[in-house]
Image (tube, grey):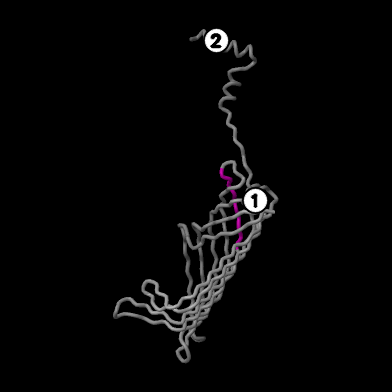
């Protein structure tokens, strides 16, 4: 066995290959880095959602005889700049508007217990600005699919008014709100072509502070402050959008 080892070393020496070179070549890893979004690229896009519904003697669980109309509109444009390969920073702006007109609704808990709501009107709109830092991670060597993590700092506010009843029984609330939040929203980006991509992201954790000031019947004033921490997937924060890479 010893003679065989010496013979192998002599053959390698005659071929100009050393044992150290052979060992380095055998264990040298070969990594290939794939850049999904190169430095210097602008990313712009918008997500829009709209829903409208009309109820006529509709029934849902314990609520019966629902008659009314609702609609909801949400618009959120975005502008980011890639200051480093696969790292972008920028901002988003959002606007939400919701309207509910409820003519009648009956809450029936049992045959002997029921409540009625007549002539309810609620209109609310909110706006917010978000500072964004986004990191992309390509899936394997693909330049079409990637996941990203988005760190967000959000500041916003809004107003809403709620009125119930008619005539002398009319009552209303007016609210103004301010909210500040920090969160993380991972997502996925899929390129449809060289310039456009479909994106989806969802909030999974964050800290939020809200301050709501309420004025009832133009007489009574109240304040509500809340702090919350979220460490789970928030299905209500799922958003879809179309982005353009310029």
Residue neighbourhood size for the residue with mark 1, other residues' Cα within 10 Å, grouped as few (<14), some (14–19), many (≥20): few
Which residues are drawn in magenta?
130-139
Disc 2 vs disc 1: Cβ atoms closer than 8 Å? no
Foreground pick, 133 / 14: 14
Task: Identify which residue is drawn at 50% across, 59% down.
Answer: 206
Query: Is 34 left, or right, of 111 in this rendering?
Result: right
Foreground pick, 160 / 182: 160
Looking at the image, the residue that sits furthest to the top is 3
Task: Identify which residue is drawn at 59% across, 65% down.
Answer: 48
Q: Is residue 134 magenta?
A: yes
Looking at the image, the residue that sits furthest to the left is 112
Q: Which is the main secondary structure of the residues drawn in magenta?
A: strand
Secondary structure beneath label 2? helix
Of tags 2 and 1, the one toward the viewer is: 1
Query: Is 80 left, or right, of 107 in this rendering?
Result: right
Q: Position of residue 192 (x, y in %)?
A: 62, 52
Task: Identify which residue is drawn at 34% across, 77% down.
Answer: 108
Query: Is 218 left, or right, of 33 in this rendering?
Result: left
Looking at the image, the residue that sits furthest to the bottom is 168
Secondary structure beneath label 1? loop
Residue 47's disc is none
Which of the two discs, 2 and 1, labels the residue nearer the N terminus? 2
Q: Position of residue 205 (x, y in %)?
A: 49, 57
Q: Position of residue 9 (x, y in %)?
A: 57, 12
Above or below, 127 against 91 in this view is below
The residue carrying mark 2 is 6
Quadrant position of the C terminus in the picture: bottom right
Q: Position of residue 106 (x, y in %)?
A: 38, 79
The residue carrying mark 1 is 193
Quarter holding residue 20 = top right
């Amino acid at each position: 066995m010893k003679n065989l080892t010496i013979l192998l070393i002599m053959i390698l020496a005659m071929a100009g290959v050393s044992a150290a070179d052979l060992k380095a070549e055998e264990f040298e890893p070969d990594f290939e880095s794939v850049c999904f979004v190169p430095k210097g690229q602008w990313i712009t896009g918008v997500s829009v959602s709209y829903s409208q519904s009309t109820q006529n003697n509709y029934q849902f669980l314990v609520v019966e005889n629902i008659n009314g109309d609702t609609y909801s509109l949400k618009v959120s444009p975005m502008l980011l700049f890639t200051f480093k390969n696969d790292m972008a920073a920028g901002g988003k702006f959002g606007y939400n508007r919701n309207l509910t007109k409820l003519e009648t609704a009956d809450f029936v808990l049992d045959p002997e217990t029921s409540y009625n709501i007549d002539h309810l009107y609620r209109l609310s709109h909110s706006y917010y600005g978000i500072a964004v830092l986004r990191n992309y991670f390509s899936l394997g060597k693909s330049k079409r699919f990637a996941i990203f993590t988005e760190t967000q700092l959000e500041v916003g506010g809004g107003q809403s008014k709620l009125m119930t009843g008619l005539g002398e029984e009319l009552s209303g609330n007016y609210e103004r709100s301010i909210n500040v939040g920090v969160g993380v929203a991972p997502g996925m980006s899929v390129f449809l072509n060289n310039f456009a991509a479909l994106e989806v992201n969802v909030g999974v954790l964050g800290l939020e502070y809200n301050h709501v000031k309420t004025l009832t019947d133009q007489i009574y004033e109240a304040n509500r402050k809340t702090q919350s921490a979220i460490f789970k997937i928030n299905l209500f924060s799922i958003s879809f959008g179309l982005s353009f890479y310029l």
